[in-house]
Amino acid sequence: MATTTNNSKPPSGKAPAGMGSNPTIYRYQNDTNNDDTLPMPVPWWFNPSTAKLYNNTPLEEDDIIVSSGVKMGTTWLTKLLVSLLYDYDDDGNLKPDAVANRETIPGRFGQTYPDAMYPTRAEKAEDAHGIYTRMPNGEEMLDGAFGDFVWEDVLEQPRPRMFVSHLFGRRYLPKALFDDDHDHVGGNDDDGD
């Protein structure tokens, strides 16, 4: 069963000294982990229900998956891809709807992690997993960092759809990515899982 555990809360919503902005007090282990596999540390905003949905997402042939480690240029790469794919035409001119789309389409203004959102608007409105209570001003912090989006928005974004996450490997990325029907660029898709 997909689980997120929390043994303690950081004092006043801040990470303990020396732990950066994402204290590792939350851990995740999805259904496909072996019993001998340790749970993965995750940030305070992690939502196990959308992590599982992401892992089971059917992919379109032109979907783009960006999976990278923390502090490895994820924001830079995301903004570069958005500029090349969505914001500018072949002559380098800003497309008429590019600025408006930054507010209405996931990933256009910055990163939109699947594991940092609720599956539906209804679950977001009721804070079904208590994510917003994990930090002071949790909802404002989360929406400010990733946008006011839910998983349904990510699935319905115009093609090519772009998925950006720090989740990695066969246990956490979409299972369909590892079918023979998909091309891989860079990285090692044989991560021993």
Image (spheres, rainbow, N blue to C red):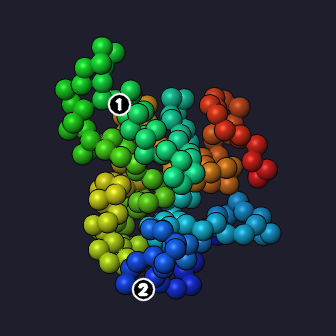
- The residue mark sitting in front, 1 or 2, is 2
On residue 97, which mark appears? none
Is residue 134 placed above or below 21 in the rendered structure?
Answer: below
- Residue 31 appears in view: yes
Determine the residue positioned at 49% across, 44% down: 73
The image quarter in which residue 41 lies: bottom right
Q: Residues within 10 Å of mark 1 (few under 14, many from 20)?
A: some
- Residue, disc 1: 83
Q: As shown in the figure, which amino acid type bears the numbered disc 1?
A: Ser
The image quarter in which residue 177 lies: top right
Q: Residues within 10 Å of mark 2 (few under 14, many from 20)?
A: few
Name which of mark 1 and mark 2 comes first in the sequence. Answer: 2
Determine the residue positioned at 69% across, 49% down: 170
Q: Residues under labels 1 and 2: Cα distance?
A: 39 Å
Q: Residue furthest top?
A: 91
> In which quadrant of the rendered image does the N terminus lie?
bottom right
Q: As shown in the figure, which amino acid type bears the numbered disc 2?
A: Pro
Q: Is residue 106 left or right of residue 177?
A: left
- Residue, disc 2: 11
Is residue 134 placed above or below 161 in the rendered structure?
Answer: below
